[in-house]
Structures are given as C-alpha cells and as structure tokens.
Amino acid sequence: MINNNTNMPGGKELIDARSLLEKMGIGERMIVADLGCGKRAYFSLQAAKLVGGFGLVYAVDVLKTALENVISMANLFGVANIKTVWADLEVFGATKIPNQTIDLVIINNVLFQASKSEIILQEAGRILKKAGKLLVTDWKKTLIPFGPSAENRVDPEKIKNQAQGAGLILIDEFEAGPYHFGLIFEKR
C-alpha cells in the first residue's frame, strides 16, 4: 500500500520531480525505470506514488549503498512498488530489465558523470516500449557555485544525437528548473 504522505521528498530545491513526471503524463499502472536513481531517489519515490499500487518503479544504480537507502526511504514512506536493481549503466543490458517493457525511463543528473552516455541511452531505448518516453534532465552549462564544474556538464545537443542513434525521437525540450534542462524523447 502506498502512503499518500505529501511530505515525501521530491528534490524541489533544484528540480521538481513530481511536476516533471506529471509533465511526462505518468499515470496509474505504468512501469517506470529510474536509471541512476541515486541515494535520495527523488524521482523513484515520486514515480512510485504516481503509478499507484499496480504500477512498478525500477530504481537502478551502480552504488549498492544508494539502493539500500532507496529501500529505507521506500519503507519510511510506505512505498511497496519500487524494485531496486544494481547495475552498471555503462554496460549495455546490465539492468536485466526485459526488452520493451517500460513506459517511462528517467535519467536525472547522470549523463554529466558518464563516460559512455551513449550506452545509457541505448539501454533506455532497449527497455522502452514502442511509444514509451524518456525524460533526461541534467545540469545547464552555466556558471553556478554548486553542482559539477562547467566543463563536466553535458551538451544537450550531444544527448540529442546519441538518443537519435538509440532510436529515440526528441519531442520536447524545456527548462527543468533554474539549473537544469529537460529533454523528452519517444521510442518510435
């Protein structure tokens, strides 16, 4: 059973996970994969709440400690529809999520730290259903006193090209907050 506690963390200080998921059209019974969920799992927790008890969220990360924290957070907020997956996203197929089973993939603040971002986007393309959507949010290339250094921030044009190579079509580009850009792709 999902606790509808409105105090569930959503990372609104920098990026509003719930608002972006609603923009994506997330709904009941959807299956979602949060690739690189991180220890706070803002997107995973909000997605789990929005897909309801008959939906499922795969929270994927390479750090086992992050996944342990996701489980603790899910238990704290009464969320039972999150499945943690330990995987190196820079290895194609490492998530072991079956092909074409996911309605929505989320990649939030991951690509700036990846050396093989094209593999992560290929994995997203592999697991997405036809007409499934991918949300990519990452740091804008602006100078601010926090976040990754400007030279480590990823160029949205590079992501667009790599996503196209993975069979994903850009359908929207937007400001995902004061420090982030957002890209929405669809699998055709």
Image (cartoon, helix red, strand yellow):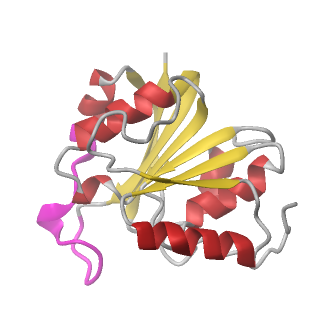
Does any portion of residue 178 appear in the rendered image? no
The majority secondary structure of the magenta stretch comes to: loop
Using the image as rendered, state which of residue 130 and residue 97 is in the foreground.
97
Residue at 38 percent of width and 67 percent of height: 179
Using the image as rendered, state which of residue 74 and residue 138 is in the foreground.
74
In the rendered image, the vertical position of residue 176 relative to residue 75, given as above or below: above
Magenta residues, start to end:
142-159
In the rendered image, residue 90 lying in the magenta stretch gets the answer no
- Image quadrant in which the N terminus is located: bottom right
Using the image as rendered, state which of residue 33 and residue 152 is in the foreground.
33
Q: Quadrant of residue 74?
A: bottom right
Q: Residue 170: image x %, image y %?
A: 42, 29
Residue at 84 percent of width and 62 percent of height: 2
Q: Is residue 137 left or right of residue 47?
A: left
Residue at 82 percent of width and 50 percent of height: 52
Q: Residue 3: image x %, image y %?
A: 85, 68
Q: Residue 112: image x %, image y %?
A: 25, 57
Does any portion of residue 56 appear in the rendered image? yes
Which residue appears farthest toward the left when viewing the image?
151
Residue at 33 percent of width and 46 percent of height: 89
Q: Residue 149: image x %, image y %?
A: 17, 72
Q: How many numbered circles are shown?
A: 0
Which residue appears farthest toward the bottom when viewing the image?
145
In the rendered image, the vertical position of residue 99 relative to residue 142, given as above or below: above
Q: Quadrant of residue 4?
A: bottom right
In the rendered image, residue 151 lying in the magenta stretch gets the answer yes
Using the image as rendered, state which of residue 42 and residue 182 is in the foreground.
42
Q: Is residue 11 left or right of residue 7?
A: left
